[in-house]
Image (cartoon, grey):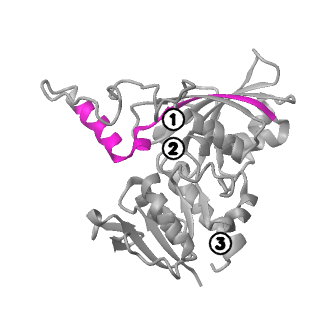
Amino acid sequence: MGYRVAVVGATGNVGREMLNILSEREFPVDEIVALASRKSLGTECSFGDRTLKTQDLDGFDFTGWDIALFAIGSDATKKYAPIAAAAGCVVIDNSSLYRYDSDIPLIVPEVNPDAISMYSNKNIIANPNCSTAQMVVALKPLHDRATIRRVVVSTYQSVSGAGKEGMDELWNQTKGMYVPGQEVEPSKFTKQIAFNVIPHIDVFMDSGETKEEWKMVAETKKIVDPKIKVTATCVRVPVFVGHSEAINIEFEEPLDAEEAREILRESPGILVVDKREDGGYVTPVESAGDFATFVSRIRDDSTIENGLNIWVVSDNLRKGAALNAVQIAELLGRRVLKKG
């Protein structure tokens, strides 16, 4: 016996990945529906060897459905998630709307699976920000061993994190660089993204940090440990898929690179590729389409006591969004619903 699953926002980048991953991981589905806004009604989406036609989210009856994976942004989620939850369907939401609600669990299954028990508070579970998800997968096993005091992270985030419009803008600007008179002015991003980097993701806050940077701080504290100090600089780079992060970690206890490497090799969701030679590390190109969070460039930081540097790369549409949501659904099935 399997589950009745709704994918909400099925025509977007993340929604399509959710359908792909549900199929790839053979999630026990008895019935599945692809939901989207009325303007996308009838759009075809792939689910394994099946083709689904999207149905209209507005007015859809969630009664009798077990799980709804939401990938529609905060505004639409605010309207439709409570409706689904009230109908008895557990919502797993990819937007930022519920991440900071103390009554709603924010989950990365490799990191804080026990938080799943909180789902019953509102029948809603939050999925973290893409840049946070891959970072905490790498941080948690190291924190368990030596207790992290402080994290300094610089991100190199792909344009797919800004949706289809971001990918289109990079593609069109890149083409326009080679065709005189066809240059494309920025619209999705604040500056040219082709052959450039932009130290600005989401809106600026009064503190001077961007909302993306604030999210990484707040979410790491909620998922891993509120005592960890985090500072982030988030940068958009001209890469289509795959986020990268340079992470500097200060521990309370001694932990050298060799031991950290062994710990990470044995940790769930992580693949260590760390050869000190040309090409002995992972870049976003290699991470695209993969489930793993890759860790490379593991090395001691001699400038501080108990310091370590690591390089973390992951497919942001997968572990940063769709994969983590499906993993939450799997966790929910194993620990709570127990149908599959």
For residue 263, say whether it is visible: no
Residue 273 screen position, x and y as percent: 62, 38
Question: Which region of the structure is painted magenta?
Answer: 148-175
Cβ atoms at labels 2 and 1 below 8 Å apart: yes
For residue 291, say whether it is visible: yes
Q: Is residue 70 left or right of residue 327?
A: left
Q: Is residue 256 left or right of residue 76?
A: right
Q: Residue furthest right?
A: 253
Give the quadrant of the C terminus. bottom right
The circle on residue 37 is none
Q: Is residue 72 left or right of residue 268?
A: left
Which of discs 2 and 3 lies nearer the camera? The answer is: 3
What residue is at 69 percent from the left and 71 percent from the top?
A: 334
Q: Report if residue 164 lies within the magenta region.
A: yes
The circle on residue 283 is 1
The circle on residue 287 is 2
What residue is at 60 percent from the left and 50 percent from the top?
A: 99
From this view, report whether residue 223 is shown above or below residue 11.
above
Which of discs 3 and 1 lies nearer the camera? The answer is: 3
Q: Which quarter of the picture shows residue 36?
A: bottom left
In the picture of the structure, the residue carrying the numbered disc 3 is: 333
Q: Residue furthest left?
A: 181
How far apart are the two marked residues, 2 and 1, measured between alpha carbons? Answer: 7 Å
